[in-house]
Amino acid sequence: MIGTLAYFGILSPSKILPNRCNIGPEFQCLDHQISATANTFKMRLKNNVGDPIAVQSITLDSETATKFACSTPPTNPAAWKSGEIIDFTWSGCNPVSTGMIAGSKGKVLAKLTYYSVSSGSNYAKEVNGEVFSTVI
């Protein structure tokens, strides 16, 4: 009976957990994708800060021994208007070497550093989030 439960994924709760993308209340994650076939990572984010902001950096990581990394990060917006939606795409990523294979669930951790355009870079803030999704 235990073999049957394991075969159908009942003993692997991560397989039945829903996909999610949380980047804090400052940013609404509208869509996301982890691709092992194209070696890319994508996020579509909406600025909910309430002011135009500049993004200093978005760093990616994982909880695995081999860290999730990409060779080509997206261009960070210098003036991201409040309510504006931007697609961020990383390429040259290593999902397979972190254990993320097509059809499995994977988790990518993201840290976004930004500041209000009116305040300047001396007032930078950080937001941590995660994407937990089925890898394609």
Image (spheres, rainbow, N blue to C red):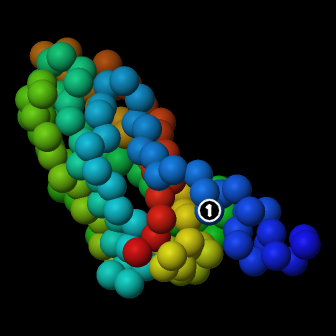
Q: Is residue 71 left or right of residue 107?
A: left
- Percent across and percent down for residue 93 are 41, 74
Q: Locate residue 91: give its quadrant.
A: bottom left
Quadrant for the N terminus, please.
bottom right
Q: Residue at x 43, y 38 (%)?
A: 22
Q: Residue at x 62, y 75 (%)?
A: 99
Q: Residue furthest front?
A: 1
Secondary structure of residue under mark 1: helix
Report the front residue among 8 and 95.
8
- Percent across and percent down for residue 128 are 47, 36
- Percent across and percent down for residue 126 are 42, 30
Q: Residue furthest bottom?
A: 37
Q: Residue at x 64, y 70 (%)?
A: 66
Q: Residues within 10 Å of mark 1 (few under 14, many from 20)?
A: some
Can residue 117 be seen in this snapshot? no
Query: Above or below — where is 46 with respect to 63?
Result: above
The three-letter code of the residue at mark 1 reads: Lys
Q: Which residue is mark 1?
A: 15
Q: Locate residue 89: give its quadrant.
A: bottom left
